[in-house]
Each structure stands twice: as structure tokens, then as C-alpha cells.
Image (cartoon, grey):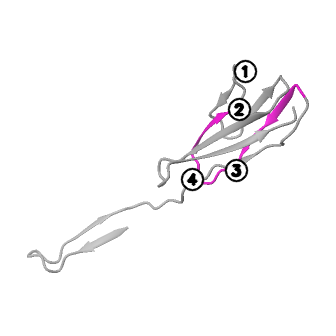
Amino acid sequence: MLILKDTSYCNNPDDSTFTISIADNVKAIISTPATGCRPYTAQINSASLNAVSWQWDFGDPTSPDNTSALENPTHLYVNTGTYTIHLTAINPGTCNVQSRYYVNDTGL
């Protein structure tokens, strides 16, 4: 709560009260094993700080399930290759609103 007092105004005392919110910045963090054998179902975990929503891109454009909005999604990789997983962690109540994190998943 922030209270402002003006003692020099003609109707002294008068004050105004309102609530302000101070939040930590959001930070995107991904946790997942870096290798697997195909077909590989990756359990991908967000260890993000202060996020309230998540936007995932699994770097697998041929997959019909290449994106997710779940906090801790799974994704089935059916082809061998190297994939870059992108996470955007979002919190509209923070100063930086969103944070991005990338992990290069190799060895499938």
C-alpha cells in the first residue's frame, strides 16, 4: 500500500491510498534429457520462475503436435535428428512479461 500525504494543501489533512504490486521478473528454464532413441517421447519440464503461462515449440515442424501451452508437456519425436526446443514463459504482471529459453536436443 502506498500512502501520499499533502500537508500544504488547503484541506489538510487529506490522503489517498491505493495498492501496488511489485513482481519478480519471469525467467524461462527447461529441463529434459538431451538424448534418446527413436521413437522418443520427451518429458519436457518447465523450471521457469514466476511464469503463469507457457508457449512451447518442439522444433519438429513435421509433427502435428509441434507446439503446446502446457507447463510440463511431452512430445513424441519419431525421426532421428537434432531438435531445438523453444520455451517462452509469460507473466503479464512482471516487468519483462516474457522470457525465452532454448535447448538443443541431440542424439535421436
**Which label's residue is closer to the chain start, 1 or 4?**
4
Q: Residue at x 69, y 23 (%)?
A: 61
Question: Can you give x and y, in whole percent of width and height, for residue 91 in the image?
Answer: 52, 48
The residue furthest right is: 37
63 or 12, which lies in front?
A: 63
- Three-letter amino acid code at disc 2? Phe
- Three-letter amino acid code at disc 4? Val
**Which label's residue is closer to the chain start, 1 or 3?**
3
- Image vertical order of residue 79 relative to residue 98, above or below: above
Q: Within 10 angstroms of label 1, few (less than 14), some, or many (20 or more) residues?
A: some
Per the image, the residue denoted by label 3 is: 47
Per the image, the residue denoted by label 2 is: 58
73 or 67, which lies in front?
A: 67
When asked about the image quadrant of residue 49, the answer is bottom right
Dot 1 falls on a residue whose secondary structure is loop
Per the image, the residue denoted by label 4 is: 26
Q: CA distance from mark 3 to mark 4?
A: 11 Å
- Image vertical order of residue 10 relative to residue 66, above or below: below
Q: Within 10 angstroms of label 4, few (less than 14), some, or many (20 or more) residues?
A: many
**Which label's residue is closer to the chain start, 3 or 4?**
4
* Numbered range of the magenta stretch: 38-58
Dot 3 falls on a residue whose secondary structure is loop
Q: Is disc 3 in contact with disc 4, using a CB cutoff of under 8 Å? A: no
Q: CA distance from mark 1 to mark 2?
A: 9 Å
* Residue 91: numbered disc: none
Q: CA distance from mark 1 to mark 4?
A: 29 Å
Q: Residue at x 34, y 69 (%)?
A: 2
Q: Is disc 1 in contact with disc 2, using a CB cutoff of under 8 Å? A: yes
Q: Nearer the viewer, mark 2 or mark 3?
A: 2
Dot 2 falls on a residue whose secondary structure is loop
